[in-house]
Image (cartoon, rainbow, N blue to C red):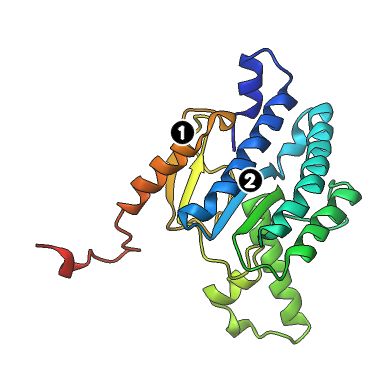
Amino acid sequence: MDGNGRWAKERHMPRLEGHRRGAEVVRMLIDKAPAYGLSHITFYVFSSENWNRPEEEVNGLMDLLRRVFTSELPKLKSKNIKIKTLGDKSTSTKLPEDVVNLLTRMENETADNTGLHINFAINYGGRDEILRACQCFVDDVEAGRRWVGDLDERLFSQYLDTDLQPDPDLIVRTGGDMRVSNFMLWQIAYAELCFLEKYWPDFTEEDLTELLNEYTGVERRFGGLPNLSSIS
């Protein structure tokens, strides 16, 4: 969800105003997603590299997370939405303790919901996720819970933050940059990638409709050949 700060700067507003506007777009997409038949959405909220931003902006983002998640949690629960947070929430990270507790509360209070599944990636990095997954597997081997020979793609996926969720089909990045920036490096192996020039606060339902219409016309071969029975 890139371009919040630049969106605000071009309008002579504080960067945090761009983040607030970006949060409104997230709300819109959560509301609209079920009508499109979407089962999982992941929002890349705060990367493990974002700690390098100015302290004032980081603190403002943490306050925004507190306000938005606290106010939206009852609505998400009432809509049968299941929440999971991706990223390192251990005590050794820079995440404030109250934010960690809030994220844990969101997961716990929506754990039994069966509707739209939303992931919020916070203090997240794809390389870090893979390293943490490897360490957890090694810990289980050393504790006798696993054998080295057990490891395959499915088992390894269980150690990732996404556990056994389906891999994403479509990755959308706004803001004009054509890179994935350390996002879901394992999971996006066969995802369609879409890069938009517009900033995240300008993303609309019409953009979502257009992207999904384009995606449904893509033939997914996963390294194989086209379905010959469909060729005339």
Residue at the location (76% across, 75% down)?
Answer: 139
Q: Position of residue 195 (x, y in %)?
A: 45, 37
**Mark 1: few/some/many CA within 10 Å (<14, 14-19, 20+):** some
* Image quarter of the N terminus: top right
Counting from the top left corner in percent of width and height, residue 73 is at 77, 52
**Is 170 above or below relative to 18?**
below
Is 31 displayed left or right of 204 in the figure?
right
229 and 67: which is toward the camera = 67
Q: Which mark is residue 44?
A: 2
**Vertical placement of residue 176 versus 165, above or below:** above
Residue found farthest to the top: 12
| Identity of the residue furthest to the right in this view | 97
Pointer 1 residue: 196
Res. 201 image quadrant: top right
Question: Element at badge 2?
Answer: strand
Residue nearest the observer in this picture, 31 or 222: 31
- Amino acid type at circle 1 is Leu
Q: Answer above or below: position of 81 versus 180.
A: below
N-terminal-most mark, 1 or 2 = 2
